[in-house]
Image (cartoon, rainbow, N blue to C red):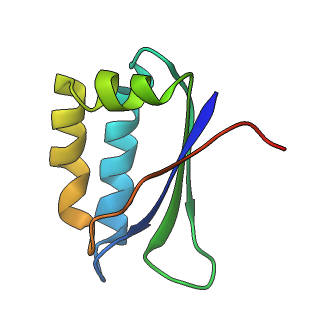
C-alpha cells in the first residue's frame, strides 16, 4: 500500500464551495481500482489549507488508473479551480 499526500491551498473565500465540491468528487476517486481510503483534513492554524491523504494499492493505481480515467477528468473539473498554487503530490511507502 502507498499513501498519496498533497497540501491543498484553497483560494480565500472559496472554502465552503471547495468542501461541497470535494463531497461531490469523493465517489469519483473511491470507484477507482486500487483505491483504499481518502482523508481530507482542514488545517487548524492555516485557514484554507487542507491535507489530502489517499491510500492506494500501488502508485500505478493512481497514476495510470485514476489519472488517466474519465473520473479524473470530472475530479479535476470539480476541484482544480480552487487551488492556488496547484498542489504537488508525494507518495509514501509502508510505515517504518
Residue visible at 18% across and 36% down in the picture: 74
Identify the residue shown where x is 30% and y is 50%: 21
* Residue 85, image x, y percentages: 27, 73
Most foreground residue, 78 or 95: 95
Residue 3 position in % (x across, y down): 59, 40
- Residue at the spot x=66%, y=39% of the render? 93
Furthest residue toward top: 33
Compared to residue 23, the image places residue 28 above or below, namely above
Q: Is residue 48 left or right of residue 55?
A: left
Of residues 51 and 12, the one drawn nearer to the viewer in this rendering: 51
Q: Residue furthest right?
A: 96
Q: Quadrant of residue 66?
A: top left
On the image, which quarter does residue 18 sit in?
A: bottom left
The x and y percentages for residue 48 are 43, 76
Q: Quadrant of the C terminus?
A: top right
Asked whether 14 or 29 is in front, the reply is 29
Q: Toward which corner of the image does residue 38 lie, by quadrant?
A: top right
Image point (32%, 39%), residue name? 24
**Picture coordinates of residue 89 (x, y %)?**
42, 53
- The quarter of the rendered structure image containing the N terminus is top right
Q: Is residue 27 left or right of residue 51?
A: left
Amino acid at each position: 500500500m502507498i499513501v498519496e499526500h498533497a497540501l491543498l491551498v484553497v483560494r480565500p473565500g472559496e472554502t465552503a464551495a471547495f468542501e461541497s465540491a470535494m463531497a461531490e468528487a469523493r465517489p469519483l476517486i473511491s470507484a477507482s481500482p486500487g483505491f483504499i481510503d481518502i482523508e481530507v483534513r482542514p488545517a487548524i492554524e492555516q485557514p484554507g489549507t487542507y491535507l489530502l491523504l489517499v491510500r492506494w494499492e500501488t502508485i500505478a493505481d493512481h497514476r495510470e488508473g485514476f489519472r488517466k480515467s474519465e473520473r479524473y477528468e470530472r475530479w479535476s473539473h470539480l476541484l482544480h479551480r480552487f487551488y492556488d498554487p496547484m498542489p504537488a503530490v508525494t507518495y509514501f511507502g509502508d510505515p517504518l
